[in-house]
Image (cartoon, grey):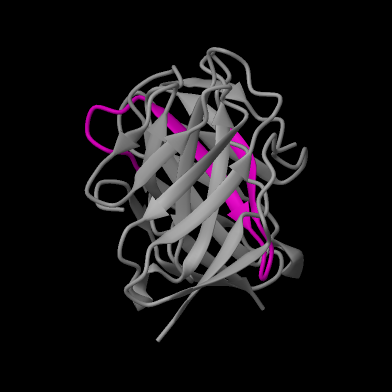
Amino acid sequence: DAKTTQPPSMDCAEGRAANLPCNHSTISGNEYVYWYRQIHSQGPQYIIHGLKNNETNEMASLIITEDRKSSTLILPHATLRDTAVYYCIVRVPNRDDKIIFGKGTRLHILP
Amino acid sequence: NAGVMQNPRHLVRRRGQEARLRCSPVKGHSHVYWYRQLPEEGLKFMVYLQKENIIDESGMPKERFSAEFPKEGPSILRIQQVVRGDSAAYFCASSPGTGGSSPLHFGNGTRLTVT
C-alpha cells in the first residue's frame, strides 16, 4: 500500500504557482520522496525527488519539512499542459524497490 | 518518457490468443518493471526483473502471465489465452540500479484491447 496521503483533486489558475501537498508521516530516515505525474494516456513522468534537502530542477521544486513528515511539490508557473495526476511516492532504497502508486492528486489548470 | 521504448503502442487480440508486449529499457539500465493500468484505475505493479532474473513478481497473476528480461534483447511480457479483462494499458519502466536515488523512467505503454 502507498505510504502517502494526497488530496484527490486540486485546481490552479494558469500562470500561478501550483502547490501540491503530500503527507508521509511514517517515512523512514533513508526513504526518498519522489514525485511523478501522468498526463492522460501517457506513461508516468518523473518530476523530482529528494531525501532531506529542498530540491529544484527545470520542472519543479520540492520542499520537504524538517521532520520529513510532509512535502510540497511546486510548479512555479502552471500551464494547461500541467493538467495531470500527480503522485507522491516514498521509496525504500533496498533490493526490492518497486514503486507503489497511490491515487495521486488530479490537478486541473484553469484558463 | 524518451528512452524507454515499448511496442507495439496498440495491440488488438481476440479472446484466447496470445499477447506479447516488448520493452527496451534506457541504454545501460539493467532493471525493468512492468505495471498495468485498467481503464479509469491506478497503476498496479506487476513484476520487477533484472537481467535474466525475476526479482519480484508479487503483482503478476499466477496464470497466463509471464515475463522475461534476457541477457540480450528487450523485456517481454507475455499473456496467454487473453480474456476481455486483460484489456488495459501496460507500462514498462527501467532504472540503472537499486537504491532510492535512481528514478524509474517509464515508456508510453502498450494499450491492449481484447475483443
Q: Residue at x 34, y 44 (%)?
A: A61
Q: Is residue B27 magenta?
A: yes
Q: Compared to A101, does A38 lie above or below?
A: below
Q: Is residue B108 above or below residue A25?
A: below
For residue A16, say whether it is visible.
yes
- To which quarter of the image does residue A13 belong? bottom left
On the picture, is A20 further left or further right than A76? right
Q: Number of labelled discs?
A: 0
Front residue of A74/B21: it is A74
Residue range in magenta is: B24-47
Please tell me which residue lies in front, A52 or B52.
A52
Between A38 and A106, which is closer to the camera in this rendering? A106
Residue that protrudes farthest toward the front in the picture: A66
Image location (x, y in percent) of residue A5: 69, 44
Residue at left 38%, top 46%? A46
Residue A24 at x, y = what percent? Answer: 65, 33
Residue under the point 22% across and 49% down: A58
Does A9 sit above or below residue A5? below
Q: Quadrant of the N terminus of chain A?
A: top right
* Residue B105 visible from this viewpoint: no
Find the residue positioned furthest to the bottom.
A111
Q: Any magenta on residue B88?
A: no
At horizontal 45% and vertical 48% (from top left) the residue drawn is: A73
x and y, in percent, of residue B21 in the image: 47, 53
User: Which percent across, then down, holds residue A94?
Assistant: 54, 13
Left or right of residue A88: residue A36: left
- Judging depth in this view, the residue of A82 and A68 nearest the camera is A68
Quarter placement of the C terminus of chain A? bottom left
Q: Would you say B43 lies left or right of A55 here? A: right
